[in-house]
Image (cartoon, coloured by chain):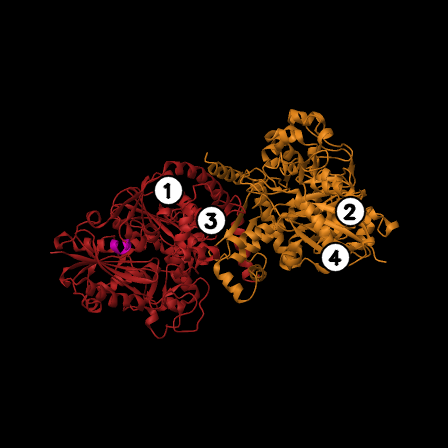
Chain colours: A orange, B red
Amino acid sequence: MKKYTLGIDFGTLSGRILLVDVENGEEVACSIVNYKHGVMEEYLCNTNQRLPLDYALQHPQDYLDVLSIGVRKVMNEANINIDDIIGIGVDFTACTILPIDSDRNPLCFNDKFKNNPHAYVKLWKHHSAQEQATKIIKLAKKRNEKFLARYGYQISSEWLLPKILEIVEEDPEIYDNTDKFIEAGDWIVSLLVGKEVRSSCQAGYKGLWHKQDGYPDNEFFKMLHPKLDRFVNNKLSINILSIGECAGVLSEDSATLIGLKAGIPVAGAYIDAHSAVPAVGITEEGKMLMIMGTSTCHMVLSKREIFVTGISGVVEDGIIPEFYGYEAGQACVGNAFEWLVDNLVPKKYYDAAEKEGMSIYNYLNKKAALLKPGENGLLALDWLNGNRSILSNSELTGSIYGLNLLTKSEDIYRALIEATAFGTRVIIEQFESQGIKIDELYATGGISKKSPLIMQIYADVTGRTIKIGSSEQAVALGSAILGAVVATSKNGGYDSITDASLKMGNVDTVVYTPIESNRLVYNILYNEYKLLHDYLGNGENEVLLRLKSLRNKILRGE
Amino acid sequence: MKKYTLGIDFGTLSGRILLVDVENGEEVACSIVNYKHGVMEEYLCNTNQRLPLDYALQHPQDYLDVLSIGVRKVMNEANINIDDIIGIGVDFTACTILPIDSDRNPLCFNDKFKNNPHAYVKLWKHHSAQEQATKIIKLAKKRNEKFLARYGYQISSEWLLPKILEIVEEDPEIYDNTDKFIEAGDWIVSLLVGKEVRSSCQAGYKGLWHKQDGYPDNEFFKMLHPKLDRFVNNKLSINILSIGECAGVLSEDSATLIGLKAGIPVAGAYIDAHSAVPAVGITEEGKMLMIMGTSTCHMVLSKREIFVTGISGVVEDGIIPEFYGYEAGQACVGNAFEWLVDNLVPKKYYDAAEKEGMSIYNYLNKKAALLKPGENGLLALDWLNGNRSILSNSELTGSIYGLNLLTKSEDIYRALIEATAFGTRVIIEQFESQGIKIDELYATGGISKKSPLIMQIYADVTGRTIKIGSSEQAVALGSAILGAVVATSKNGGYDSITDASLKMGNVDTVVYTPIESNRLVYNILYNEYKLLHDYLGNGENEVLLRLKSLRNKILRGE
């Protein structure tokens, strides 16, 4: 009498549907549907219209295809009774937003607006609203807005309000014709249950919403732009579901669309990274989860609301109910290693790797693994894509020290790995200095599974054990866990995220434990890292910002 | 009735003989003889005896082969009358020294000592006497020795005394059996003229000798090591020729060895870099010559003796009579570019270069030339091989700032070029701040001929015009000029280096002139360079030294 839930995870390039056994979290089947339109960064789809710099748009039809194709695919593969699906959870990248009309149709589906970039989905990494973000911070600081402290006094251009202000300023017609702006995750859930719902996770981390205080005052929005008068009431929704709450049940229409039966309970949406927390079984304080891929997200639970400087956000019930959920981040992890491999690995290494029948990554890993800590004589600052936590400055850039005529590609590779680990340690120490203990680390995401070398270095640098999430699809598993929670125990699910996580969340038996002799060397190197981190990141010498601004001027021909 | 001189140039890997027309410096013929034993860095020749770290030895037979083979080759090629050779000049790398017996035979020619590394030639880049150099500086500072100021308060491990002290400490038997220690350049000239002679150039720049004060006191040597009591009198020679003085005439024996007639006047030896000064026609103040290759040597003439902090040396009559000759240096120029090409250029660039039928250097140059100053957003410190001037610290290492996910190999290449140019500007500003004006630059050496991109960047960064020496063999040409001086006008030569240089020295018609718009951007970047240069090089943050020392400890297994 097995019961199952579906975790539907919308990533940056594809969506995946994971069918999970509610009893133990076993992953029965998984289907992946790539987005036909991918990420629009240079041209608007089906046009020759060139997009401005730093744009990243998506087509909402791609999300609908994930639902209509993906769920059927996974059901076919699993070959289970359709009646045994007892719940659905959804997670999405964030802040990924779109303008919809009063029928909840995306504006870009309307022929009138289909050539208008602002009518499409703004993906989380749409970065062109930096100017707007700066304006928002300035005004908020001037008005001494209370919300600022919750976000470490920084508002990212990736978040909701900068993206909205960009539309207001650049295409007021779209703003006027929009009934609501909605997170894509909330849009999907609203579609499934046939009514508008919003999640505390998205609203809290990306929308400046607070459980007690709600959104910022209308006065603030009005001062930001006259058109934003009554923005919250008119264009958002104040009806916010706590994480784990049931959004409603699958509507007849949606059931037809995805090929399931109507009436299945659907959970409010998770942000993708946050969804991984229950998937690795974290339901208490003292543990930090690192979701390690291109970049790293750090998730921490605490019973206390503390405004940790330089931490991206703290949201009550944002990850697990009855906890304050903290999010921090590193903008540059896997992408730094990729950058090295793409740009700074010599031909002879490719030749040698081919000869040994290895990927270039494995070859580099093998070479880097032979080095002792400190042996390469290098130290790097890992800011090649800016610094998210704790400096919150996307304009910062990377640097390397200790280069000599014997420095090889693998030395730099290892230095970059170490630098990202030092960056994690800075975040841990920041949490701890403000009273939030972190005793143990958990990791999930591609890197955690693929590179024992990297994980050991992280253990050595942070001086903490690291457990690795078992699932290759931890994010989707987290959504399936929410699906089991909204199903409730009465129907074969669970009555809390904690209960569900303990049964369905999993970690590997392999645990990375710090090696004492390495830890001692890394303590020395970390002190050097921190010294340069503060020198170059905290205003003492702003050479990195000046170099960046000179570069931008020259590229713009000024 | 044309007359000719021979310039005999002993480099690191080969010797070359240049036959030059005395009237105009025209290079009639040139022969190159590679050293059969090359540089012994790992094993002593003809043995399995492993050499200690940082050794660099040579076999003096290789120098004799240059004489016996090379001169005949060049005469055959030139097809001129043997009587029209009116003078010979010799230059050599320095400090390159060897121990000889009372018959002026190298100790390593003696079967008794042929398995003893200390019996061989210590090449300039024999770097294992760092400990001894440190000891010498310490004692000299304690005794407040006057000579220290002439060398910017630094004694390089490359110089004569550290190399001697190493022998005294490690193989006293060799020290005792040595009649004299002699610069290889002086040894060659002594051999040619059949009597012992020494040059002010070698003695001044590498041997702590001063025209008025002579060598340091015997007391100093005694305190350094008891065995060094009476070191100068017993093991050196106080009979020092000024530059341009005649050492004697070709002896019968030597004439037979090399295939010329006895009686040709031979000049005292030049250091190879210094020899390039007259070859480009510099005979006055206000001009700096850069000999640009693996590393760069900077030569400046002045009527005034000033102790410029961080400058390698100042020697009266050391380059041209009646001038104080200043030498500065950058330890890392061409070797940094080579390092990049060997280690950090991706496979796809090699493939593309091959497709375009270009060398990888030309391909990188082409890509780097497309970048505007400041466009790569990068800044580097060029200390990958330590810093010679003005920080005199071989333990310093390189660093790069501004790295981002779009940084390419050519960006780093250009940043390294710019960094070496900034390093040159630091040297120029150091000279000028102490009252030695530098209005114009001259360059010679491989880079000056091969890379217009690099030379233009140097002009833009320094804000000065750069003239390029015409000769591909400027160093050998300088020696040929000395040969013409010792011939005297009576025999078809000249009576001064200035006269000879004006007729025989040459520069190209191409002159690199600063481009104003580039200069402005580089002024900004130079200020950033200087800030980091002082921060990391002047003791404010000694992270580079600590990284190096940690690395050394780990490599030694401590």
- Residue B52 appears in view: yes
Same-subunit check for callouts 1 and 4: no
Looking at this view, is A468 or A93 the one in front? A93
Looking at this view, is B235 or A19 the one in front? A19
The prevailing secondary structure element of the residues shown in magenta is helix
Crowdedness near tag 2: few (<14), some (14–19) or many (≥20) residues, C-alpha within 10 Å: some
Q: Which residue: 39% across, 53% down?
A: B362
Q: CA distance from mark 4 to mark 2?
A: 16 Å
Magenta run includes residue A119: no
> Is disc 1 in contact with disc 3, using a CB cutoff of under 8 Å?
no
Between disc 1 and disc 3, whose residue precedes? 3
Q: Residue furthest right?
A: A490
In this rendering, the answer to whether B357 lies above or below A399 is below
Amino acid on which the number 4 mark rests in the picture: Asn
Q: Which residue is mark 1?
A: B428
Tell which subunit mark 1 falls on: B
Amino acid on which the number 1 mark rests in the picture: Ile
Q: CA distance from mark 1 to mark 3?
A: 24 Å
Part of the protein shown in magenta: B472-478
Magenta run includes residue B476: yes
Crowdedness near tag 3: few (<14), some (14–19) or many (≥20) residues, C-alpha within 10 Å: many
Looking at the rendering, which quadrant does residue A367 occupy?
bottom right
Looking at this view, is B494 or A23 the one in front? A23
Amino acid on which the number 3 mark rests in the picture: Ile
